[in-house]
Image: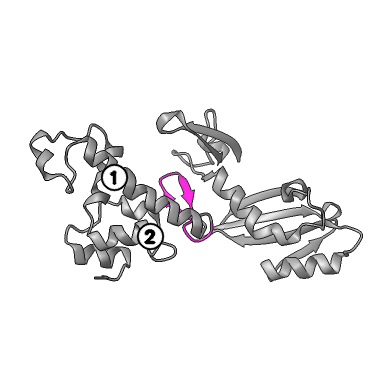
Amino acid sequence: MRPNFGYGRGKKIYRYYVSGTLLPLGRLKAGSTTPLGDRLSAERTERFLQDRLSSLKPDCPDFKIFEAIKNVMFSSNKLKVTFRIAALIDTNACEDTLLAKAQQIDPTAKIDSDDLVLSLDARPLRRGKSVRSTDCFLDAPEQRRVLAELVRTSHRKLTELNASPLHPEMHEHMSTPINEWTRERIAIGLLAPDIQRALLTGKAPLGLDPEKLLSRDMPLDWEGQRKFLGIRHAA
């Protein structure tokens, strides 16, 4: 995989790790007519690794865990991480201690020559050629922030379009959204009020995929929306 990037709204840069087959001049596998591969969000992947592997760091405040990583491979829904043991050992530790720490993260972790190898469950959900993980790559604080921001963005767009349910007096001046991005988001502001309240206050179910709010499969009736999102009705 190779580093790559793309531009989002407002020219925000998004970084990715992309299979060579999906890049320009990428080679197809023998017998294949379409490119096969994966695209991982670099920011989420790196944050996931930083969080899951921080306990392996030696007792040094300035040490960065990525300095000890030899390589990371993504395969079969797993991130296989290979460390240089020498970079993780300090004066107060030994290989046995390091391996014991690693096996608390991955019971199958092992020492292979001068390397420490362990495997992390990424459990990705595929969106076309990209790979995301709602369970691992999106931590709880970020999830709450993203869900709440989706609701706020929706109401800002509804107000701009004079379509806000909070201001019916403006509906005679209503205009239609000009792109798919806006169309997807304004629907969130029309969800059941208790669902929006749960999203804004951080009371949505842990692990709720923000992408699910943008799904075209979202039911129109409020009770169907609650079942679809796994949110219980609260008075």
Residue 89 x/y as whole percent:
86, 58
Quick one: quadrant of the N terminus? top right
Quarter occupied by residue 80: bottom right
Which residue in the protein does label 2 denote?
201
Magenta residue check for 133: yes
Q: Is residue 185 visible?
A: no
Tag 2 secondary structure = helix
Quick one: quadrant of the C terminus? bottom left
Q: Are marks 1 and 2 in contact (CB under 8 Å)?
A: no
In this view, 74 is above or below 235: above
How far is the residue under mark 1 from the one under mark 2? 16 Å
Q: Could you say which is closer to the camera, residue 186 or residue 121?
A: 186
Q: Could you say which is closer to the camera, residue 234 or residue 130?
A: 234
113 horizontally vs 18: left or right: right
Please report the residue visible at 17 percent of the width from the left and 57 percent of the height from the top.
220
Residue 194 x/y as whole percent:
26, 63
Three-letter amino acid code at the position of disc 1: Ser
Q: Could you say which is closer to the camera, residue 40 or residue 12?
A: 12
* Magenta residues (range): 124-136
